[in-house]
Structure formats: C-alpha cells, structure tokens
Image (spheres, rainbow, N blue to C red):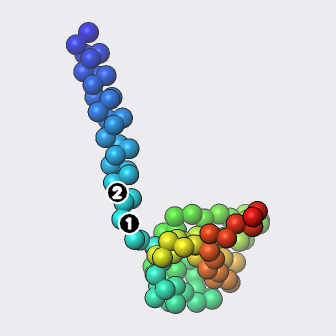
Amino acid sequence: MKTLRKMMFIFIIFALTVPVAVAASSCGDKSGITPDAYAKIEKGMNLDQVEAILGTPPRSHRTGPSQNPTIIWYYEKSSGEGLLKITFESAKVTNISPYDTSINPDE
C-alpha cells in the first residue's frame, strides 16, 4: 500500500511540474528569425547552408516524388508576426517567402 501511495505521489508531482516547466520556458521567449538572419538567405543555397544560419526548422514538410521532393521549411519571425517559408527544389533554395499569419483568408 505504501508503494502505491509513493507512486501516486510521484505521478501527481510529475503531472503538475511538467506543464508548469513547459509554460515557464516559453514565457518571454523572443526567439525567431531576425531581419538580419533573413537577409543572409539567398536563392541557390543548400539545406546545410540555410540550417547553419537559421538552425533546424521547427516545422517542415515534403511534397512531390521521393527521389527529388520539394522541401519547405517554416521559421517564426522574431517579431512574432508571421512566418518565414523557405522552399527547396533539388536541395537548393528556390523561394524565400515571409508572410504574416495574422491574415486569415477565411475572413
């Protein structure tokens, strides 16, 4: 019985601590792509070059054939007002598109 109580106590502490830690880690976070970093990205760069400047993208997806997919990376802007979308074809940057997520096309 004591073991069950200990396990329940640990579970409750864990269940309460993890969400608080996650919430605290995101408070005041001003990370994201700055205009200076954005200005360094150029068409023709490869995946490794972009990742060296901007880091690993928090969101990405692939479309097209598996042998030569179109790869799209998304980064949040440091201003918090939108995303930066980088499109790669043949593993080279072909398009760099900043856009504002506050615009809702359904409105």
**Residue 13, placed above or below residue 33:** above
Judge the density around disc 1: few (<14), some (14-19), many (≥20) Cα neighbours within 10 Å: few
Q: Position of residue 12 (x, y in %)?
A: 32, 29
Residue name at image x 24 percent, y 21 percent: 6
Query: What is the distance, in whole Å, between disc 2 and disc 1 at their CAs?
Result: 8 Å
Residue name at image x 52 percent, y 85 percent: 38
Instruction: Count all numbered tags in the image, as a single digit.
Output: 2
Q: Find residue 7 and report its image quarter.
A: top left
| Amino acid tagged 1 | Asp
| Amino acid tagged 2 | Ser
Q: Position of residue 50 (x, y in %)?
A: 52, 80
What residue is disc 1 on?
A: 29
Specify whether residue 51 is in view. no
Q: Does the residue at mark 2 contact the one at mark 1 (Cβ under 8 Å)?
A: yes
Q: Residue 25 carries which label?
A: 2
**Residue 93, placed above or below residue 20:** below
**Residue nearer the viewer, 10 or 82:** 82
- Determine whether the residue tagged by mark 1 lies in a helix, strand or loop: loop
